[in-house]
Amino acid sequence: MGSGDDLKKRVASVMERYSAKELRKLQREMGQLEKRTHSKPEKVVEKECLLWMRAKGWSVEIYEAKATFDPHTGRYRQQAMKAGTVDCHGNTDQGASVYVEFKAPGKLSTFAQERNYRQQQFLRKKIETNVFAVVVDSPERLERLYNGWEFFRRRGDNAKARQFLIAMVPTRVRKVSSGMPF
């Protein structure tokens, strides 16, 4: 008897959500609600950074590394790009390689999560080969990191340029037990 009531409640809930969504869509079309402009804040950062990079004469492209769910295996399968590849690849106007991972504003710390381990490793490997490889949440951060990296490279100090970029990769802070009960 209870399962029929649960089903009715679930169906009613789904119908209410659908109706509310359709009402908002209709209100937007009629000009009663403002259109959503930033439903994907990471894409806004991507666009602004691309404008900055291309204004500097860089040749960069966005690459989508998507995974799709395979119901036969019950897993996600990587499509087109290798897992861990960052969002943007290319080169500066001077020919230096560029790799950039974009994050929504204020979400840099999410890069340090375990699920982003492959991307963390990808960036570190690129940095170790003297490449400009970063994770950014704004064009201002991109510019600061590039200027810092370029500062050391102009002085011929690739080791400090690498150290600078490695220090800028968000990492997880591990809690260290002091052995104290508090």
Image (spheres, rainbow, N blue to C red):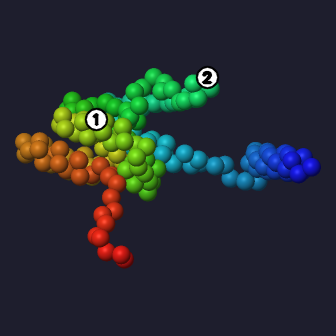
Q: Residue at x 28, y 70 (%)?
A: 178
Query: Mark 2: which secondary structure?
Result: loop
Residue 137: image location, x then y, percent: 40, 50
| Nearest-to-viewer mark from 1 and 2 | 2
Q: Is residue 170 above or below residue 70?
A: below
| Quarter where residue 119 is shown | top left
Residue at which label 1 appears? 98
Q: Quadrant of the C terminus?
A: bottom left
User: Is residue 62 visible to us here?
Assistant: yes
Residue at which label 2 appears? 72
Residue 19: image location, x then y, percent: 82, 47
Res. 175 mark: none
Kindly identify the amino acid type of the residue bearing the numbered disc 1: Val
What distance separates the C-alpha of mark 1 from that of mark 2?
A: 38 Å
Kindly identify the amino acid type of the residue bearing the numbered disc 2: His
Extreme residue in the right direction = 1
Q: Residue at x 11, y 44 (%)?
A: 159
Query: Mark 1: which secondary structure?
Result: strand
Label 1: few (<14), some (14–19) or many (≥20) C-alpha neighbours in 10 Å = many
* Residues marked 1 and 2 touching at CB (< 8 Å): no
The number of callouts visible is 2
Drawn side of residue 78 relative to residue 169, left or right: right
User: Is residue 132 visible to us here?
Assistant: no
Q: Nearer the viewer, residue 87 or 58?
A: 87
| Quarter where residue 122 is shown | top left
Q: Residue at x 62, y 26 (%)?
A: 71
